[in-house]
Image (tube, grey):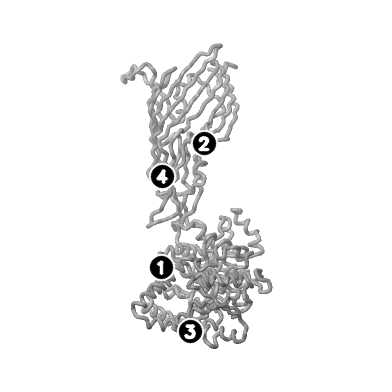
Amino acid sequence: MSSDPSYHLGSARFTTHQPVVLEQVGAHHAYARGLTGRDVRIGIDDSVVDYTQTDEFGNRVRLRASDGAQLSYSHPFGDDASSSVDLCRGNRTCTVERRDSQGDEEAHNRWVREIVSRGGWPTRDDSVFIVDEHYSEEDALERLLRWWEVPTPYGEHGSHGTAVASVAAGKNLGVAPEATIIPVARNFSPDEQWEEGLADADLRSAIALLGSAELRELDDALASVYREDYARFDIINRSYGIPEFDPDTVSSAIASELQWYRQYLPNTLDALLQVGTPDARKTVLVYAAGNEGQPHPGFSAYLPYHIPELHGHSLAVAATDPRTGSIADYSNRCGSLPRDWNAARHGQHYCLVAPGTARGLLPDPDSPGRGVVGEVSGTSIAAPIVSGALALLMEHFRGTRGNTEIVKRMMDTADRRGRYSDLATYGAGHLDIAAALSPVGSLNAGQSARALSRTSLRTPAAFGSLGRRASGIELAAFDAQDFPFWVPLSGLVSAHSNGRSPIPEFVDRKPADVAAPGLDGLGLHWVALDPAGSIQFPGEREWMVGLGETSASLARLPDNGEWGYGVSFDDAGYLESETSGAFGSDPRSGMIWTSRAFERELGAGLTLNASGTLAFSLPRYEGDALFSASPSIMSAMSTRIGTESTGFTVEQPLRAESGTGTFRVENGRVENGRRLYDIHRVPLRPDARELRFALRHERAAFGGNIAVEIGHSTNVGHVSGESETAFGLAYRITW
């Protein structure tokens, strides 16, 4: 999948399946990041979703009650004369199957799946019923649970849920094409809704007659059921509502409902409003604002205006006309905010806008399992576009931010430019997925919160490619809203070059007289100390002092067949490493080393010179730096065979033989305002050993000296497979 957003604009999703809409909301920026909504659970609280449409939904539709699915409608008065069930039985226009669930909550969904598998979905309402004989017809409450209808996904109302699901999460049509879909079947027939209203009134009357102990037991049980049910969803899309706009009627109905619950079922009310559930784990409810062209959303979508407990996790979505980008004529507006609205906590509004016309899947009764793609319109379509976008954001931030934080992110990054600044019409603004997925302000990294743009680490050449060994590790950098954005750590880490100039140097002294092999990277300028001076040094061998801008060393250099040793300190570095930003700016180091050299005459004018060094490094990094290296043992060696003018040399540059590098990187999570981090340890020892081979000849010529060198290095920089070949020529005139 391409990481270029423009690539996706030319794909079939944008040109054929869902033109205009996906581009308007910036979905291509999500797809360029590889986002699909995978594993995010979207409940489609609507008419039943035709899960047999596998070309569009695959196997992503969950069909078990334990997942939150409900595949049938309840008919609480199915045993009553003149009910829809009784009428169809009298007219012999329906089929009735008698089953016994034995109280198993999975039974009803299982029965629906069996019936659909056997003969397909019913093609019309009120044609297939199931009576659950586990519940008694004689018990006033149990009889409300006896009758269930196998719904139809066909027709004007029946196909609604499938169309909504396809826009939210269809493979070809959906905003989040790999999100999990959970059907929650709802009967939109006016007759059945009236029947449910009567059943609710009967149930409330029965509850009002319970004793206090029974009432508390029921309240706790119902509250537990609702909390468990919410926990099965990340998002619930409700593309329906009640078209009631009279302020007095709305206020009175809400006040009456809240009063009843607080009197009889206060714990259940808290569960319904998700009171007591941490904000981060609240299920997001997405409502269609309604299609009546009113100045504020319909009843259900308008509840956050009246009920503070719904702030932050209950959204309303109004619709725009994709052709113009302006509010659709039919759409209800977002309306004003309640006086107690906390924008710093919940975002700019509880309502925003999205395109209200899209292509949706409509099941075809003449070809079961297949559908017709057609244009569908309404705030019912704008809502699942937002639900799908929420799924993309939830996936992108990897569970490091709670659902309500994701909602606030969406609201705060919505497009409020130009016409969208009209809060009463557009609320928080127009959905903008690209902005929600992009950093707000600059990114910073590490405990010290340093700018990511200035954060880098250049490790000593002795470590080889530490960045390659750290591949797969990601660093979470944070934007101005404290949202994480992950960057590969390897992109911030590079190795110091240990390369050697192809131009040969003229050597007037033996290498052993200059420094122990491998320690040339200390950046010191060696100066001899006179042992006859005021400071006495043991032995006759020359002692040296190395001085750099921030470093110093005292060394007894090795003579033929003898040991040398020394100690060095660097107050502003470690073997020429460089750090900045969150990697710190003040690495320091010390080193203890020993070296041995010998020289042997081989005859025929040939001489063998060899030397080797073992060092023990002691680095120190800033306490809050992203990286630190442990003390480690290092080695280097050099061997030369040849005459005074011609020689063949084999060298191994300084190389770490032990030690561990520790990356302490934020993982994107925040707990009690504190960023959490992961520890990753990688070996300092490189995967390979660099060896340098050089053939060199030096002689007097043309009034001076000329030197020629041919060199080849294997595993350059101690990196396996890297090689380098060089030819060099140098001339020095003698004055």
Q: Which of marks 4 and 1 is nearer the N terminus?
A: 1
* Res 103 seen here: yes
Q: Which of marks 3 and 2 is nearer the N terminus?
A: 3
For label 3, the SS is helix
Tell me residue 672's x, y (percent).
37, 57
Q: How far apart are marks 3 and 2 (CA)?
A: 76 Å
Tell me residue 482's x, y (percent).
44, 56
Q: Mark 2 points at which residue?
A: 687
> In percent of the image, x 45 and y 81: which residue is there?
141
Q: Earlier in the sequence, mark 1 or mark 2?
A: 1
Q: Name the residue under label 1.
A: 342
Q: Distance between the residues labelled 3 and 4?
A: 66 Å
Q: Name the residue under label 4.
A: 625
Q: Say if mark 1 contacts mark 3, CB within 8 Å.
A: no
From this view, report whether residue 34 is shown above or below residue 264. above
Q: Report the front residue among 220 and 141.
A: 141
Residue type, label 3: Leu
Residue type, label 4: Ala
Q: Distance between the residues labelled 4 and 1?
A: 37 Å
Q: Distance between the residues labelled 4 and 2?
A: 25 Å
Q: Name the residue under label 3.
A: 198
* Mark 1 closeness class: few <14, some 14–19, many ≥20 residues within 10 Å: some
Q: Which of marks 1 and 3 is nearer the N terminus?
A: 3
The quarter holding residue 115 reads: bottom right
Identify the image quadrant of the N terminus: bottom right
* Mark 3 closeness class: few <14, some 14–19, many ≥20 residues within 10 Å: some
* Mark 2 closeness class: few <14, some 14–19, many ≥20 residues within 10 Å: some
In this rendering, which labeled residue sits more in front, label 3 or label 2? 3
Tell me residue 319's x, y (percent).
56, 72
